[in-house]
């Protein structure tokens, strides 16, 4: 993809130059027909130069859309990272900059990320729901306080302390920041967003993010939409090492070719959906693109 280039965008928060990678369709310029745009967010421990989702980038490029990979303050080990207002605004600034320079189809602006990028996808979808045509959050962290309890003695716990200036409970200011930076605090605002929340059923055992982070996130949206919740018993069943439902519903047994793997739980609430699939701490690029095309990105629409 020869049209991938680094851009610098001046932050409207602090005036610093914040980098992104931008991949344009072949022969695309300011005079081209408006194209769709996928904003793809890096994982927890990565920044601009790490965690690249090349499989998704290639599919976006082949689709004739624009691919934006912002830095948003990089790895989650500084106060301005980890879903801070600076990090949020960096994403919005990068999006606005691309829209100012290139013809963007405003009905096809999509958002996605894996792991820490899934955390940020849920946060941005709930804080700025009108910005996105559809979003897909893979193996994301929805509740930072709960995730800290899982990793307090490891590297992720230390990284969170570096971001927040201490641990949960150390001060009221830290706890306020944890709530503000946790998608679960805001996800009721995303009830009208076409948001896919997905996780591999072995994550939390072979990966770092237990799938309850995805299930609880969905339940916040379901409650706001007046839809049926995933029950506590079902969450407990799906949180076992051999995660499966004792009494799956028809939607839990669906086959989805875009996933190319078995699905163990799938529920819908308004325009949001949760999917637990055979896999671990990963995203599936073909399923991301299928979700985007289903929700506003179909060819010719």
Image (cartoon, rainbow, N blue to C red):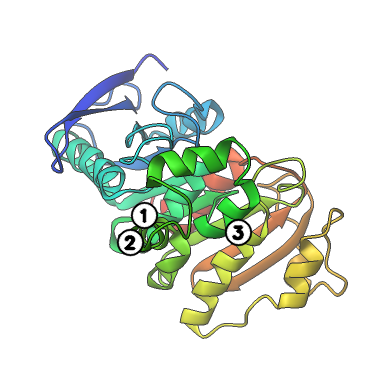
Name the residue: 67% across, 41% down: 281
Cα–Cα gap, marks 1 and 2 = 5 Å
| Quarter of image, res 67 | top left
Q: Which residue is mark 3?
A: 213
Residue behind mark 2: 127
Quadrant (top left/top right/bottom left/bottom right) for the C terminus: bottom left
Residue 300 - label? none
Kindly identify the residue that appears in the image at 30 percent across and 43 percent down: 87
Looking at the image, residue 11 sits to the left or right of residue 69; the answer is: left
Quarter of the rendering occupied by the N terminus: top left
Q: Nearer the viewer, residue 14 or 129?
A: 14
Between 142 and 159, the one lying in front of the other is 159
Q: Position of residue 5 (x, y in %)?
A: 31, 18
Figure check: 245 above or below 152: below
Q: Measured along the vertical axis of the image, is residue 190 above or below residue 54?
A: below
> What residue do we see at 73% from left, 44% from top?
260
How far apart are the alpha carbons under marks 2 and 3?
18 Å
Q: Secondary structure at mark 3?
A: helix
Looking at the picture, tell me which residue is in the foreground, 151 or 255.
151
Q: x%, y% of residue 162?
A: 42, 39
Q: Is residue 107 left or right of residue 205?
A: left
Checking the image for residue 124, the label placed there is: 1
Task: State yes or no: discs 1 and 2 in contact (Cβ < 8 Å).
Answer: yes
């Amino acid at each position: 993809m020869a049209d991938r280039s680094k851009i610098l965008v001046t932050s409207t928060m602090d005036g610093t130059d914040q980098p992104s990678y931008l991949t344009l369709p072949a022969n695309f310029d300011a005079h081209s027909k408006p194209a769709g745009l996928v904003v793809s967010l890096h994982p927890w421990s990565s920044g601009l130069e790490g965690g690249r989702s090349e499989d998704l980038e290639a599919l976006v490029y082949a689709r004739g859309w624009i691919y934006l990979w912002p830095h948003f303050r990089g790895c989650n080990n500084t106060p301005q990272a980890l879903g801070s207002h600076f990090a949020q605004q960096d994403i919005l600034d990068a999006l606005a900059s691309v829209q100012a320079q290139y013809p963007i189809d405003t009905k096809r602006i999509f958002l996605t990320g894996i792991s820490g990028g899934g955390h940020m996808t849920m946060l941005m979808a709930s804080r700025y729901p009108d910005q996105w045509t559809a979003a897909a959050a893979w193996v994301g962290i929805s509740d930072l306080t709960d995730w800290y309890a899982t990793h307090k003695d490891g590297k992720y716990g230390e990284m969170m302390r570096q971001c927040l200036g201490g641990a949960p409970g150390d001060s009221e200011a830290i706890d306020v920041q944890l709530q503000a930076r946790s998608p679960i605090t805001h996800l009721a605002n995303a009830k009208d967003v076409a948001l896919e929340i997905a996780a591999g059923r072995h994550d939390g055992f072979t990966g770092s993010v237990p799938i309850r982070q995805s299930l609880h996130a969905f339940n916040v949206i379901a409650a706001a939409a007046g839809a049926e919740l995933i029950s506590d018993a079902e969450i407990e069943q799906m949180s076992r090492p051999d995660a499966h439902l004792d009494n799956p519903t028809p939607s839990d047994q669906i086959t989805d070719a875009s996933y190319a793997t078995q699905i163990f739980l799938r529920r819908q609430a308004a325009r949001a959906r949760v999917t637990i699939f055979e896999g671990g701490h990963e995203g599936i690029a073909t399923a991301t693109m299928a979700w985007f095309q289903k929700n506003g990105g179909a060819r010719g629409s």
